[in-house]
């Protein structure tokens, strides 16, 4: 009788919803993401480099910064299709390798021009390959009811580098020069590829049968509304992330990384300790709440300026820490395995459409009407996104 019970217990299937999120494999993926994020996020200091070292104007800063995100948008849909057909790991390795080469290329930059523009495009390609593949791997290994938590942890690891990399990069550049900072990013990118050796490809991630095309994603109910809202939030994000540095320098603030550090600390705190909040309270509801906070951040930048520079970064981090994984989980929760990569890619691409357009267009707004108009339009974009989500048709999924 005892042996029969033992056999029955041993053969009982594991409830995937009770499985732990932080497995050894997931930890290896997080470590690889951390290393890649350090290489990538150091270039959030690029506006300062362009302004101080290359004497770039606001429109030039916006244009050069936006190139990486335009490249992301151009490639992201293809990456989604590829990783559903060929698996995730191949493209994560490709992203790490390309980022290593790009960081080495930055060592040669001493002026504005076509070479810098090409590096920014390749930088965008590298980020797209790695991020879409790695985030899809994170979704693959997550227990279904803990999807929001898993994506929150993954996002927290990437966002943490938004503080670590700019702070370290600014210290390195101040003490040893920009060449040393660029060399450090190349080493971090190479390390990310080595750490991926601890991650395996899951059988369900290989597309052996015919995989649905990208049209299957856009055919999902209400997806257009969510993607437009995501893009509008990206405009706000681009306004603050691209232009807080030249704005700070114009106010006499020299240590610009404080904004990024405060942003990242707040975002990581939300994702690491409150990562399951959207799963419990409703993903749509939390997305709407966070968009309200999103819109307040650029308005605070205009009204408070230098007196609350770090606090505004923290407000943006709080909003983004809730918004991005909550809306991400909302769009991916019902996606089949053979379209999950495309859903991740399209979501990421929508945000970066807004980011790139915001970075490009708002630079010209700043030159024509000042930073007040720039940040005012950035805030308006998030409130427009909030209105879109609030007006979605009845019967929508509210989780």
Image: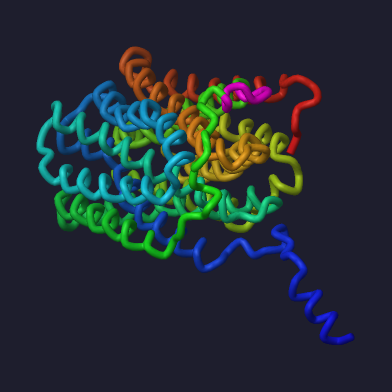
Q: Quadrant of the N terminus?
A: bottom right
What's the residue at 51%, 46% (across, down)? 136
Residue 296: quadrant of the picture: top right
Residue nearest the observer in this picture, 212 or 221: 212
Residue 393: quadrant of the picture: top right
Q: Quadrant of the C terminus?
A: top right
Q: Is residue 383 above or below residue 188?
A: above
Q: Position of residue 89 (x, y in %)?
A: 41, 51
What's the residue at 79%, 75% (across, down)? 9
Q: Position of residue 367 (x, y in %)?
A: 31, 17
Residue nearest the observer in this picture, 122 or 12: 12
What is the residue that sits farthest to the right in this orientation?
1
Q: Position of residue 194 (x, y in %)?
A: 32, 62
Residue nearest the observer in this picture, 284 or 96: 96
Q: Is residue 236 visible?
A: no
What's the residue at 28%, 35% (across, down)? 47
What is the residue that sits farthest to the front in this orientation?
209
Q: Which residues are magenta?
A: 216-223
Does the magenta portion include 4? no
């Amino acid at each position: 009788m005892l042996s029969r019970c033992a056999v029955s217990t041993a053969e009982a299937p594991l409830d995937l919803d009770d499985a732990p999120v932080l497995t050894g494999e997931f930890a290896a993926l997080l470590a690889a993401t951390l290393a890649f994020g350090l290489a990538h996020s150091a270039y959030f200091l690029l506006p300062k480099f362009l302004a101080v070292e290359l004497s770039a104007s606001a429109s030039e800063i916006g244009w050069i910064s936006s190139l990486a995100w335009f490249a992301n948008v151009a490639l992201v849909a293809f990456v989604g299709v590829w990783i559903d057909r060929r698996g995730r790991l191949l493209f994560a390795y490709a992203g790490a390798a390309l980022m290593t080469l790009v960081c080495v290329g930055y060592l040669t930059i001493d002026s504005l021009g076509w070479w810098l523009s090409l590096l920014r495009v390749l930088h965008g390609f590298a980020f797209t390959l790695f991020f879409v593949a790695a985030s899809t791997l994170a979704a693959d290994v997550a227990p279904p009811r803990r999807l929001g938590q898993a994506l929150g942890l993954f996002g927290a690891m990437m966002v943490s580098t938004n503080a670590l990399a700019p702070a370290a990069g600014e210290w390195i550049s101040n003490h040893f020069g920009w060449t040393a900072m660029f060399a450090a990013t190349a080493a971090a990118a190479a390390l990310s590829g080595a750490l991926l050796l601890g991650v395996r490809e899951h059988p369900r991630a290989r597309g052996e049968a015919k995989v649905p095309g990208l049209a299957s994603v856009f055919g999902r109910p209400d997806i257009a509304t969510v993607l437009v809202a995501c893009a509008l939030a990206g405009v706000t994000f681009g306004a603050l992330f691209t232009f807080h540095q030249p704005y700070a320098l114009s106010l006499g603030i020299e240590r610009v990384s404080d904004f990024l550090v405060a942003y990242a600390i707040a975002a990581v705190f939300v994702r690491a300790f409150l990562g399951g909040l959207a799963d419990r309270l409703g993903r749509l509801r939390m997305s709407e709440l966070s968009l309200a906070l999103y819109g307040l951040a650029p308005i605070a930048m205009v009204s408070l300026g230098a007196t609350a520079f770090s606090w505004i970064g923290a407000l943006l981090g709080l909003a983004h820490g809730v918004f991005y994984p909550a809306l991400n989980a909302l769009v991916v929760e019902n996606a089949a395995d053979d379209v999950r990569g495309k859903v991740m890619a399209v979501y990421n691409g929508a945000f970066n459409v807004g980011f790139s357009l915001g970075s490009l267009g708002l630079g010209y707004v700043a030159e024509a009407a000042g930073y007040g108009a720039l940040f005012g339009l950035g805030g308006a974009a998030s409130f427009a996104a909030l209105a879109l989500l609030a007006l979605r048709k009845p019967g929508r999924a509210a989780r």
